[in-house]
Amino acid sequence: MKFTKTLIAASLAVMSADTFAAAFQLAEQNASGLGRAYAGEAAVADDASVVARNPALMSVFKEQQLSVAGVAVVPDVSLRGTEASNQSVNPGQLNDSSIAPAAFVPAGYFVMPIDDKFAVGFGAFSNFGLATEFDADYPAGQLAGETEIVTVNMNVSGSYKINEQFSVGLGLNYVYADAKIIRNFGATSEQTQAQFDQLSQAGLLPPGFAIPSQTEAVHLEGDDYGFGWNVGGMYQLDENSRFGFNYRSETDITFEGEFSSQLPVGLGVGSGGASLPGRVEITLPAIAEFSGSHQLDEKAGLHYSVMWTGWSSFQNLQADVDGRDEPGFSKNENFSNAMRYSIGGDYQFNEAVLLRAGLAYDESPADKNHMSISIPDTDRFWYSFGVNYTMSDQANLDIGMSILRGKTQNFTESDDQGQQWGFESKGHAYLFGAQYNYTF
């Protein structure tokens, strides 16, 4: 489907939708937290990126601050074919060493104290995204093709300092989302080809009719926007210890666009290449995070977080087409709520250099009985390192790196022809981030 992208989508088009938190959730809202595996994000007030993770922390700021960040995602997601019920396909033809493209995730924030009680902040970042790409002639084309979801979150927040211990914050979010789903026909099963031959003999299809594997059986593109909110709280136990909590609401998105299929009209979802109005409805899940931050002495700090994501809101990925009773595309995902645990620390090496390190464990929300190569997911560990360099009284620079190691998964997936495809998947990644912070 073709459509004109909005200015927001065009200006942030570099925000490819690779995802390396659980499912298609993004953790990369800044580069300062990257160095400690995003431990303590709802309690640590490093910079203006608090707008994304806990607006109550804006009450800590005494001066205006601007933060601009970017994180490069270099994935290493591979598949090895283990089974093919189609006897004409060797399982080795399912091997793919790289199904997820590299990505760059930008973000920007500004925090402005109004007085000793109130502060406001603005942010542009992303909480969700996904991109997988397969060759058009991939044998399991009905499971593969291209899947892409890009989201951009525009946030305005305010905080109020109740007293020296308690602060609260509230944010309003405009979420722009863009999606693309392409599925190719893939290898034809013996049963399907026999049906084609019968229809050819009956004169309903041309003689020798066959469908090339690269034929687009489903092509849907669309965009939409939605609104959400987030609320945060902060408790300052003493000058060395702080706790924070943040909750981000669900956001309903209906991707409105066009559906097309190169299959002949009357054959499955075929439209003969004609475009029809179509849509995909999804609910971006709610997120809750609790964090603690403790300054152990004049040099060392300890930080930790527990994050819950309400993935049970994502049960099905389905494309509906106007004027048709049957969906153009449907995939049961059956996600469950998932947790993320992280712990990290920092060490003031000298006046200019702060060192960071952290570990995290991400639970996958994917149902073991509904694994998918289009949204590959697994439990994964984060190993993170970073540094903050103070350039002047007004400016400092954050550099972070994370190594993500996912568990190996073995599963079988079925296509619309009833064919069984077996896979062994591995999902790893390397994240590199930089962030510039300037205090006015």
Image (cartoon, rainbow, N blue to C red):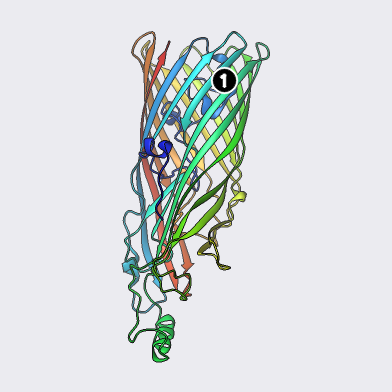
Location of the C terminus by quadrant is top left
Q: Is residue 324 visible?
A: yes
Please, is residue 86 above or below residue 29 in the view?
below
Please, is residue 422 above or below residue 368 in the view?
below
Give the percent coordinates (x, y) of residue 43: 56, 24
Mark 1 Cα-neighbour bin, 10 Å: few <14, some 14–19, many ≥20: many
Q: Total number of numbered labels?
A: 1
290 left or right of 34 in image = right
Amino acid under disc 1:
Leu
Location of the N terminus by quadrant is bottom left
At x 43%, y 81%, the residue is: 192
Give the percent coordinates (x, y) of residue 154: 50, 32
Q: Is residue 40 visible?
A: no
- Which residue corresponds to mark 1? 57
Give the percent coordinates (x, y) of residue 33: 45, 28
Give the percent coordinates (x, y) of residue 257: 47, 53
Please, is residue 138 above or below residue 152 in the view?
below
Could you say which quadrant of the image residue 187 lies in? bottom left
155 or 132, nearer to the observer:
155
Element at label 1: helix
Residue most extreme to the bottom: 201
Please, is residue 262 above or below residue 68 in the view?
below
